[in-house]
Image (tube, rainbow, N blue to C red):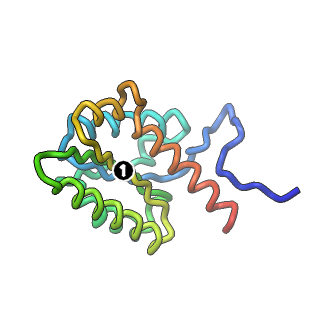
Amino acid sequence: MPRIHDGAAPPDPEHGPAAELRFAVVVSRFNDFVTAKLLDGCLDHLLASGASDDDIDVYWVPGAFEIPLVAQTCAQSGRFDAVICLGAVIQGETDHYRLVVDEAARGIARVGLDTGVPCIFEVLATQTVALAVARAGGEAGNKGEEAAQAAIETIRVLRTIT
């Protein structure tokens, strides 16, 4: 039977799967009525998974377009096991939102590939405010929680390789 590496952690009553891991969370201030909820979900999940407040640094940036540069600086610092990127870009009257989210996605992916530090992309790109709110703790769950879980699992699976 082959060895399976999935990043899932066995239950540990004393320490969670995020214990002793360090996280940077880069959050867009634009549409903060959505991103603050994503951040809450992310932090709640990290803390419930065993991370401590001292293991999490939050960096607010003006908008989603600015996320990759700050994510890159965090990743290159050597201080973090993962960088979680949170934002919300909502369609307006033009296609500007698509340009912003495409470049944010491209930049965040590049940071992870260039540095080897997991950079989790959770920049919502929605057509309406209601769809964004639904994904920030509404009926569609909280994508911030999912981003935190993705960071934990990615770190753990990478550690099985190295």
Image spot of residue 132 (x, y percent): 29, 36
Question: Residue at the location (14% across, 45% down)?
Answer: 92
Q: Is residue 119 above or below residue 150?
A: below
For label 1, the residue is 25
- Left or right of residue 95: residue 101: right
Q: Nearer the viewer, residue 47 or 119?
A: 119
- Residue 65 appearing in the image: no
Q: Is residue 159 above or below residue 30?
A: below
Determine whether the residue tagged by mark 1 lies in a helix, strand or loop. Answer: strand
Question: Residue at the location (26% across, 36% down)?
Answer: 34
The quadrant of the image that shows the C terminus is: bottom right
Image spot of residue 48 (x, y percent): 51, 33
Question: Residue at the location (71% across, 55% down)?
Answer: 5
- Left or right of residue 11: residue 76: left
Q: Is residue 16 above or below residue 65?
A: above
Most distant residue in the right direction: 1
Image spot of residue 26 (x, y percent): 32, 53
Most distant residue in the left direction: 93
Q: Residues within 10 Å of mark 1 (few under 14, many from 20)?
A: many
Question: Residue at the location (28% across, 66% down)?
Answer: 69
Q: Nearer the viewer, residue 22 or 83?
A: 83
Q: Amino acid at mark 1?
A: Val
The quadrant of the image that shows the N terminus is: bottom right
